Image (cartoon, grey):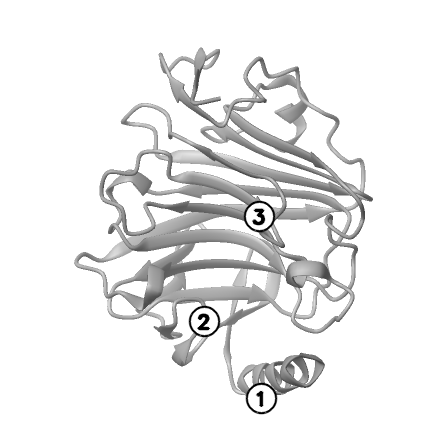
Amino acid sequence: MHTIKILIVLCVAAALARARTITFAGYDNWIVKSGAGMGPGPNDWCDTASCVWTDSDHALHLTSNTKSTEVTLDGVYVGYGVYYMVVQGDFMSMDTNAVFGAFTYDLKSDSAPGYGEVDFEFSKWGNVKKQDIASYAIHPVTAPQKTAILPAKGINMYTLTLVWTPGKTYQRSYLGRVAIDKLDKTTPFMQLVYTGANARVPPPATTEFHFNLWQYQGRLATIKNEIRVLDFVYTTNNPVPPPPPNPVEHCRSMVMLDTNEQCRLCCVGG
């Protein structure tokens, strides 16, 4: 296993040496993935400006169709702290096999269980009838996971946060764009608070942050998918305190009953 990981790291290093980079969220070293038959999926990956770009509002665009897209914040080793993201897209209308991910990942360290992977993902995973398409996962996959039904139609922007501390992670999703200094006053519509041994919660190592839009099991999309990432912040200063108690935080999934800012939620299958 150790030899395999070394080979993977060497292959990745060779690819990065000739990779395209873009500037986003104040970082000028986002590496755009390229190559054929590579995971996840496996998929073919497009690194051209027609597949991955930033617009005049400085938002990052990812697409998938015949090829998938991914960007990695190269050389910025993340760890304990606060991750803040604002994403926009019609997730329910994406291709049935399309997967949008925002996640930590560590290919370089042997000390990170499950490659130090903590995920936010939106996908139907090939099931056209699937409704609870928003999911959290911490790897290895034996750790707790959680899914939720997205709020009512017409809402296509979400704020995602991860607070990563020793032995504990907080993953949360909020309606619309919530300023980072307002998070402690806003109730998320979905959250997973995981407390476990450090063997389960990844320790900081050489973990990097990624966004991707790819096709489950490498199945080609029948439509072009596009997601915008409007903002990304990683900080180790002044971690966001826990938000007001969520009355349904122990539910497996939730569905919205109305769409005002103080949205009401009900438990589904909890």
Q: Indicate which label's residue lies in the foreground, 3 or 2.
A: 2
- The answer to whether 105 appears left or right of 257 in the picture is right
Direction from residue 44 to residue 262 in the image, left or right: right
In the rendered structure, which amino acid carries the disc numbered 3? Phe
Q: CA distance from mark 3 to mark 2?
A: 24 Å
Name the secondary structure under disc 2.
loop
Q: Secondary structure at mark 3?
A: strand
For badge 2, the amino acid type reads: Gly
Q: Which residue is found at the position 63% from the left and 69% from the top?
A: 74
According to the image, label 3 marks what residue? 232
Considering depth in this image, is 105 or 132 the residue closer to the camera?
A: 132
Report x, y in % for residue 85. 55, 43
For marks 3 and 2, the one nearer the N-term is 2
Q: How many marks?
A: 3
Label 1: few (<14), some or many (≥20) within 10 Å? few
Q: Could you tell which of marks 2 and 1 lies nearer the N-terminus?
A: 1
Q: Which residue in the structure is indicated by mark 2?
A: 39
